[in-house]
Image: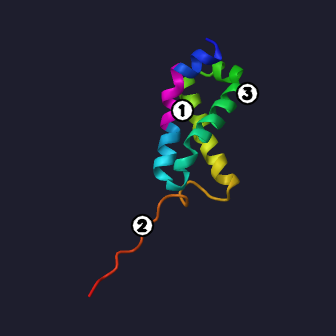
Amino acid sequence: MDYIEAIEQYMPQIRLAVDTFVRDSANWRLEKDDLIQDALLQLWQRFDQWQAARDMGAYAYRTATNACRMAARKLGQDAISAAVQLPEDEEYD
């Protein structure tokens, strides 16, 4: 399997990891495509390791999740603190 075939086959796992992160972290919604590109680049750089992985889908998911975490760390945020914080309900008299 070459890189293009692998990406086509395992893109659902990559999108799932990024979509989960983006859904839980409102500040990242505009960065979704960039996060996917980061994951794809990492997979390209480690294509030999990816091909050798027992479960290529799990490897792709883990790589995409790690790409999201690394991006959040670079901005000084962790994935949890980047999530939307709703204002406290105010009581109206």
Estimate how packed mark 3 is, as few (under 14), some (14 to 19) or many (20 or more) residues with alpha carbons within 10 Å: few
Q: Secondary structure at mark 2?
A: loop
Q: Earlier in the sequence, mark 2 or mark 1?
A: 1
User: Which residue, given by chain and number where applicable, does mark 2 sit on?
Assistant: 86
**Which quarter of the rendering shows the N terminus?**
top right
Image label count: 3
Q: Most extreme residue toward the left, as rendered?
A: 93
Estimate how packed mark 2 is, as few (under 14), some (14 to 19) or many (20 or more) residues with alpha carbons within 10 Å: few
In the rendered image, residue 12, in percent from the top left (x then y), is placed at 48, 28
What amino acid type should be assigned to the residue bearing mark 2?
Leu
In the rendered image, residue 10, in percent from the top left (x then y), is placed at 53, 24
80 in the magenta segment: no
Q: Which residues are magenta?
A: 9-16
Residue drawn 39% across the image and 74% down it: 88
Q: Main secondary structure of the magenta part?
A: helix
Residue drawn 57% across the image and 39% down it: 33
User: Which residue, given by chain and number where applicable, does mark 1 sit on?
Assistant: 14
What amino acid type should be assigned to the residue bearing mark 1?
Ile
Q: Secondary structure at mark 1?
A: helix
Toward the viewer: 66 or 74? 74
Q: Are marks 3 and 2 in contact (CB under 8 Å)?
A: no
What amino acid type should be assigned to the residue bearing mark 3?
Gln
